[in-house]
């Protein structure tokens, strides 16, 4: 009985359903059907969205690569060579190049569209850039910029008849007028310009600052190796203040934020361990930290897994 029913269903699937499918497959599609036209329109919108997403991903890769190069450049600062000003000037020019080229391209792609739909396309590059930009400010002795100030730099006003921002900037540099005429010209420029904005998500800004801790930790260890042990304590105090600020964040609902907290704490422990060895060993700490094979294990100190932090876990 059960086998008969199974064969019956099997034969029905082969005969009736198969023939109906072939008849529908060979039938012509009515392009004038409003449903077909709607699906054609939706397909074009989705294709344009996917193409735009891929273009932003390519720009994101360029930003990530250039930001890493800027970080490597800033690590070449050596007080013994007295090259801080030269390295900072070169890093500043390369950062401005990213602002004026890569982020402008992303802003053009996002113009007229919801930036939240494409935030995942350039989140990695944005975090890497925030790390490089904040590390540049830290290396030059400047205060870390606020999220709003960076967002202002990521907002561009481009004339409607001149899509190239650099040409517009070069022309405005050669104009010398009084303050009253400047106010009138600014009003005219704002009315004839398109405002493009590369959206900076606050979460990307926080995560980028979390990555800064790793670079400061490396700078702390490099300072010990170069014999500048006094700066190790300054780097350690900066990381302690950063860690204190991250602990005060209680409304973050992100898995990445929890991972950044763990990485930040590990970097802080390494920096504190460096300062401890400088205090205990004195002038021998730099030589010991670069020659002794056992020093690597001390600097790479990892807290036990069952060691609970005083922070908030999500």
Image (cartoon, helix red, strand yellow):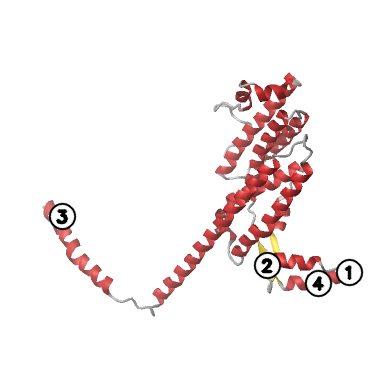
Q: Residues within 10 Å of mark 4 (few under 14, many from 20)?
A: few
Tell me where residue 29 sits by quadrant. Answer: bottom left
Indicate which disc, 4 or 3, sits on the residue closer to the N terminus: 3
Q: Residues within 10 Å of mark 1 (few under 14, many from 20)?
A: few
Of badges 4 and 2, the one in the foreground is 2
Q: Secondary structure at mark 2?
A: loop
For marks 4 and 2, give the CA distance.
19 Å
* Residue at image coords 69%, 39%: 75
Considering only vertical position in the picture, is 274 above or below 184?
above
For marks 1 and 2, give the CA distance.
26 Å
The residue that disc 4 covers is 185
Indicate which disc, 2 or 3, sits on the residue closer to the N terminus: 3
The residue that disc 3 covers is 6
The residue that disc 1 covers is 178
Q: Secondary structure at mark 3?
A: helix
For marks 4 and 3, give the CA distance.
83 Å
Indicate which disc, 1 or 4, sits on the residue closer to the N terminus: 1
For marks 1 and 4, give the CA distance.
11 Å
Q: Toward the viewer: 93 or 180?
A: 93
Q: Looking at the picture, how far across and down is residue 49, in whole percent?
A: 51, 64
Considering only vertical position in the picture, is 263 above or below 298?
below
Q: Are marks 1 and 2 in contact (CB under 8 Å)?
A: no
In the picture, the disc for residue 164 is 2
Q: Secondary structure at mark 4?
A: helix
Of badges 3 and 1, the one in the foreground is 1
Of badges 4 and 3, the one in the foreground is 4
* Residue at image coords 77%, 45%: 86
* Residue at image coords 82%, 67%: 174
Indicate which disc, 3 or 1, sits on the residue closer to the N terminus: 3
């Amino acid at each position: 009985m059960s086998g008969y029913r199974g064969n019956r269903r099997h034969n029905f699937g082969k005969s009736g359903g198969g023939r109906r499918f072939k008849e529908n497959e060979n039938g012509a599609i009515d392009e004038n059907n409003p449903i077909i036209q709607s699906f054609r329109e939706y397909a074009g919108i989705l294709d344009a969205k996917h193409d735009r997403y891929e273009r932003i991903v390519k720009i994101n890769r360029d930003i990530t690569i250039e930001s890493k190069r800027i970080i490597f450049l800033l690590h070449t600062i050596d007080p013994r060579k007295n090259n801080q000003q030269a390295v900072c000037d070169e890093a500043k020019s390369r950062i401005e190049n990213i602002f004026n080229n890569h982020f402008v391209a992303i802003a053009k792609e996002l113009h007229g569209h919801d930036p939240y739909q494409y935030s995942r396309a350039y989140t990695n590059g944005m975090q890497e850039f925030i790390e490089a930009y904040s590390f540049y400010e830290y290396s030059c002795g400047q205060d870390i910029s606020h999220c709003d100030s960076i967002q202002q730099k990521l907002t561009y006003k481009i004339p409607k008849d001149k899509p190239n921002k650099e040409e517009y900037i070069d022309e405005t540099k050669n104009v010398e007028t009084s303050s009253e005429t400047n106010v009138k010209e600014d009003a005219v420029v704002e009315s004839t310009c398109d405002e493009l904005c590369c959206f900076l998500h606050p979460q990307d800004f926080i995560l980028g600052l979390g990555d800064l801790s790793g670079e400061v930790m490396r700078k702390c260890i490099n300072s010990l190796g170069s014999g500048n042990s006094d700066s190790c304590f300054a780097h350690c105090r900066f990381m302690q203040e950063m860690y204190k600020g991250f602990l005060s964040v209680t409304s973050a609902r992100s898995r990445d934020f929890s991972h950044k907290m763990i990485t930040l704490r590990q970097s802080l422990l390494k920096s504190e361990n460096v300062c401890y060895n400088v205090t205990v060993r004195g002038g021998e700490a730099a030589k010991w930290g670069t020659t002794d094979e056992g020093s690597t294990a001390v600097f790479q100190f990892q807290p036990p897994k069952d060691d609970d932090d005083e922070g908030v876990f999500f």
